[in-house]
Image: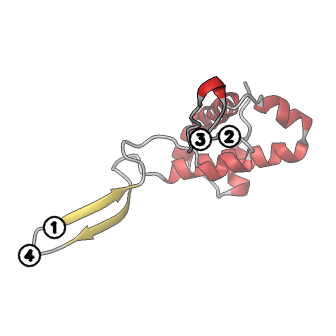
Amino acid sequence: MKPFATIGDIETLWRPLRPAETTRAESLLTVVSDSLREEANKVGKDLDNMVTERPTYATVVQSVTVDVVARTLMTSTDQEPITQKTESALGYSWSGSYLIPGGGLFIKNTELSRLGLRRQRYGVIDLYDQNKRDDNYPC
């Protein structure tokens, strides 16, 4: 299946890519597009049909694909990406928060919401048990 965005879209919507990034981005476009298709499949939607039916939706899918690829390209591949780091001196203390423990690709909930793929759950919990008397007459 065809990716929802191209290298040209990434360079137009984000920034020009370096030669080493171009090869990685080409692979990521396929992976991200298929990941979005699977997320849509989880909620019973066919993303490819939705894209062909509405050109405006196709632009949103393209934008989300570029956002996910750009975020993944910004993630360091030679060390763990740390979002917060704290160091001390004489107390020998160090702590850090990792962006994605273990690395890898991730799609944010806000991106799934932009695509209309967030499944809202609903349900009812009966807090009060109804006791039945004789002849099934409720109390």
Q: CA distance from mark 1 to mark 4?
A: 8 Å
Numbered mark located on residue 110 in the image? none
Q: Which residue is mark 1?
A: 93
Q: Secondary structure at mark 1?
A: loop
The image's colouring method is secondary structure
Q: CA distance from mark 2 to mark 3?
A: 19 Å
Task: Identify the residue at image location x=71%, y=41%.
Answer: 117
Mark 3 touches mark 4? (CB < 8 Å): no
Tally of numbered tags? 4
Q: Which residue is mark 4?
A: 90
Q: Secondary structure at mark 4?
A: loop
Depth check: 37 or 122 in front? 122
Nearer the N terminus, badge 2 or badge 1? 1
Q: CA distance from mark 2 to mark 1?
A: 42 Å
Depth check: 103 or 29 in front? 103
Q: CA distance from mark 3 to mark 4?
A: 54 Å
Rendering coords of residue 36 (x, y %): 66, 36
Task: Identify the residue at image location x=73%, y=41%.
Answer: 5
Q: CA distance from mark 4 to mark 2?
A: 50 Å
Q: Secondary structure at mark 3?
A: loop
Numbered mark located on residue 119 in the image? 2
Residue type at numbered disc 3: Ile
Rendering coords of residue 134 (x, y %): 60, 26
Numbered mark located on residue 125 in the image? 3
Q: Secondary structure at mark 2?
A: loop
Task: Identify the residue at image location x=35%, y=47%.
Answer: 78
Depth check: 6 or 71 in front? 71
The image shows residue 16, relative to residue 27, as above or below, that is below
Would you call the spot at circle 3 few (<14 residues within 10 Å), some (14-19), or many (20 or more)?
A: few
The image shows residue 125, relative to residue 2, as above or below, that is below
Mark 3 touches mark 1? (CB < 8 Å): no
Nearer the N terminus, badge 3 or badge 1? 1
